[in-house]
């Protein structure tokens, strides 16, 4: 039994060493993957920060290189509280003036532009008569054309 237990202990020791070396190898692989992920995250953070800085820089350059409008010039001269009051007064004035202006109507030859006039009874009768005549003429034309085509085909 002594030899068998020694052999079993040796096998257990060899297995333990193999498992320990495998565990060490897996830990090293995991550490490498963590380091790679940290680097990728750092690169992504730096790139997004650079894009943000570039966008802000482009906005600043745009704002300082374009000419100011008249409204912006006046706004820069007035104190901030007064700017709000002026904007409110302007809106109120626009609403008040808008209410007092009467609606405009345009007439051409005693007919209001944009308003469809109903045709008179006579006009409706004339239009229907012309439609009926045109339909009859077209029917006769096509029937003669078909007869001519059939007769030329039969010969």
Image (spheres, rainbow, N blue to C red):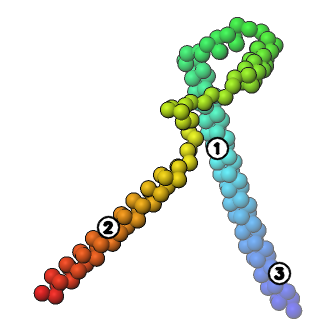
Q: Residue at x 75, y 66 (%)?
A: 23
In the rendering, at what x and y percent does residue 109 appear? 50, 32
Choose mark 3 or mark 2, whichever is in front: 2
On residue 137, the disc is: 2
Q: Residues within 10 Å of mark 2 (few under 14, many from 20)?
A: few
In the rendering, at what x and y percent does residue 146 appear? 25, 78
Disc 1 target residue = 44
Instruction: Report the Cα–Cα distance between label 3 and label 1.
Output: 52 Å
Q: Residue at x 85, y 86 (%)?
A: 5
Of marks 3 and 2, which one's residue comes earlier in the chain? 3
Q: Residues within 10 Å of mark 3 (few under 14, many from 20)?
A: few
Query: Going by the image, does 35 lie left or right of 66?
Result: right
Secondary structure of the residue carrying tag 1 is: helix
Query: Going by the image, does 25 lie left or right of 66?
Result: right
Of marks 3 and 1, which one's residue comes earlier in the chain? 3
Q: Is there CB contact under 8 Å for labels 3 and 1? A: no
Instruction: Report the Cα–Cα distance between label 3 and label 2.
Output: 116 Å
Relative to 12, is 94 above or below?
Answer: above
- Depth check: give the residue in front, 53 or 63: 63
- Depth check: give the residue in front, 84 or 116: 116
- Depth check: give the residue in front, 39 or 23: 39
Of marks 2 and 1, which one's residue comes earlier in the chain? 1
On residue 9, the disc is: 3
Query: Going by the image, does 114 lie left or right of 81?
Result: left
Q: Quadrant of the N terminus?
A: bottom right
Q: Residue furthest bottom?
A: 1
Q: Residue furthest front?
A: 122
Secondary structure of the residue carrying tag 3 is: helix
Secondary structure of the residue carrying tag 2 is: helix
């Amino acid at each position: 039994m002594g030899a068998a237990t020694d052999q079993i202990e040796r096998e257990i020791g060899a297995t333990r060493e193999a498992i320990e070396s495998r565990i060490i190898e897996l830990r090293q692989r995991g550490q490498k993957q963590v380091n790679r992920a940290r680097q990728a995250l750092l690169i992504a953070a730096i790139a997004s920060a650079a894009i943000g800085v570039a966008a802000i820089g482009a906005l600043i350059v745009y704002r300082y290189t374009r000419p100011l409008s008249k409204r912006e010039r006046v706004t820069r001269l007035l104190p901030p509280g007064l700017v709000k009051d002026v904007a409110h007064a302007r809106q109120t004035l626009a609403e008040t003036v808008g209410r007092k202006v009467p609606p405009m109507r345009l007439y051409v030859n005693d007919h209001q532009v944009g308003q469809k006039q109903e045709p008179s009874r006579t006009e409706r009768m004339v239009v229907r008569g012309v439609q009926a005549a045109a339909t009859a003429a077209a029917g006769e034309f096509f029937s003669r054309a078909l007869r001519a085509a059939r007769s030329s085909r039969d010969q």
